[in-house]
Image: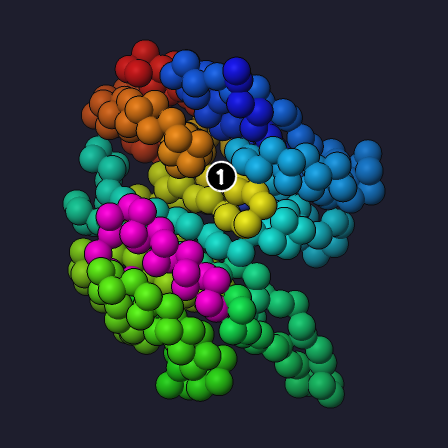
């Protein structure tokens, strides 16, 4: 029987790259009944909300979604549909596996890092106010509950995926209470996972070491803001956000999505690189137990990357999104 999975195409290049990903998954022979859901501008025009209530219900019911990027208007309009989905579904853990892909130009040849980012608190709690004119304050929230659950997520991931080490990234020398609590929780959790090595490093030092020698790292565990910045830095180590997958995990649902945005500058031009969402779909296949299909997809991607003619312009080729997708399907 086909498995029902939510498909949120998004907007901008979202529908083009989502279509590429579903075509590839379908071509693998994995039986999926895609349930398409609208968010962003189109949903706002119809329902007055960037993420309508029925979308939350449907994703919760199905438990798994594949999502394309969605635009957030700048300086007005509706609020971010991406943030709404993360908050509304309590998708507390962002996972970004960052791995060198042969054929993709980058500074390093052997990067294999996983960034685990706490998604719900820290400086992203939107608790900001003007104290007096000329003085603004933004609150950084850290709770034991969220810190323990993200540390457990990182260690569980390490165990299930044969990783050796978890590094907790912090600035507890300056933010002694918030980052101090985050570290204490990570340390407490680490004691339950004797087989996984654990260490702690200050975030600025991590950034320097990453650009010198990223092979020093395995799983990186961090709070929201550091995770946002360091995960982009890590993407840059392997060729940028176009070639890195992502997933946001909650207890009730997981959303697999590319980490790049809706790229309005190239939307509708058949120029978008679909690899980010295709690699995210591969994470989804592993999540639903389709490991053989996931492996087949990965080896086809590696073959495709050695043929520059079949790649989109950002990867140095001249092919369009549709041509690159067909070339990948031909190699499955
Ligand atoms: P962006 O990632 O959309 O674009 C940055 C640059 O990278 C552009 O030049 C674009 O053409 C290029 N690019 C991005 N993805 C590409 C792909 N797959 N293939 C080839 N080139 C690609 O970032 P930007 O411009 O900051 O954001 C645009 C919109 O996307 C904003 O409304 C933002 O809020 C939204 N966004 C949505 C995300 C999501 O849905 N998860 C994540 C990040 C941004």
Q: Main SS of the magenta segment?
A: helix
Of the 4 image quadrants, the one containing the C terminus is top left
Q: Where is residue 110? Give x, y as percent.
A: 17, 47
Q: Is residue 309 visible?
A: yes
Q: Where is residue 82? Give x, y as percent.
A: 61, 47
User: For numbered disc 1, what is the local secondary structure?
Assistant: strand
Residue visible at 70% across and 56% down? 75
Residue visible at 29% across and 73% down? 200
Q: Quadrant of residue 104?
A: top left
Specify start and end residues of the magenta stretch as a single range: 147-166
Tell me the residue that label 1 is attached to: 256
Q: Is residue 231 above or below residue 267?
A: below
Along the viewing direction, whichever of 7 and 316 lies nearer the viewer = 7
Answer with left or right where residue 150 lies relative to residue 135. left
Residue 332 is one of the magenta-drawn residues: no
Q: Is residue 55 above or below residue 168?
A: above
Q: Where is residue 165? Give x, y as percent.
A: 24, 60
Q: Is residue 268 visible?
A: no
State whether label 1 is within 8 Å of ligand 1.
Answer: no
Answer with left or right where residue 180 lies relative to residue 37. left
Residue visible at 38% across and 33% down? 286
């Amino acid at each position: 029987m086909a498995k029902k999975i939510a498909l949120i195409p998004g907007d901008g290049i979202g529908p083009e790259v989502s279509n590429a990903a579903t075509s590839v998954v379908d071509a693998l022979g994995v039986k999926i009944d895609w349930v398409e859901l609208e968010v962003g501008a189109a949903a706002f025009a119809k329902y007055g909300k960037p993420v309508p209530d029925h979308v939350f219900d449907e994703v919760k019911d199905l438990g798994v979604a594949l999502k394309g990027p969605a635009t957030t208007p700048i300086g007005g309009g509706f609020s971010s549909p991406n943030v709404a989905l993360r908050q509304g579904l309590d998708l507390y853990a962002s996972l970004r596996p960052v791995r060198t892909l042969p054929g993709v130009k980058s500074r390093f040849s052997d990067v294999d890092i996983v960034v685990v980012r706490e998604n719900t608190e820290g400086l992203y709690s939107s608790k900001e106010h003007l104290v007096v004119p000329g003085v603004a304050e933004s609150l950084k929230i850290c709770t034991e509950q969220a810190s323990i659950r993200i540390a457990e997520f990182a260690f569980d991931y390490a165990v299930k995926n044969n990783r050796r080490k978890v590094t907790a990234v912090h600035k507890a020398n300056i933010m002694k209470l918030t980052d101090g609590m985050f570290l204490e929780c990570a340390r407490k959790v680490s004691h339950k996972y004797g087989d996984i090595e654990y260490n702690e490093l200050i975030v600025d030092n991590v950034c320097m070491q990453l650009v010198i020698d990223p092979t020093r790292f395995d799983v990186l565990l961090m709070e929201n803001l550091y995770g946002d910045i360091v995960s982009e830095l890590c993407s840059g180590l392997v060729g940028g956000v176009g070639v890195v997958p992502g997933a946001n995990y909650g207890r009730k649902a997981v959303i697999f999505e590319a980490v790049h945005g809706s790229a309005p500058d190239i939307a509708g031009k058949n120029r978008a690189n679909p690899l980010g969402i295709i690699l995210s779909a591969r994470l989804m296949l592993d999540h639903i137990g389709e490991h053989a299909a996931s492996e087949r997809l990965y080896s086809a991607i590696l073959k495709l990357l050695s043929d520059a003619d079949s790649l989109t312009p950002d990867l140095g080729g001249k092919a369009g999104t549709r041509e690159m997708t067909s070339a990948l399907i031909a190699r499955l």
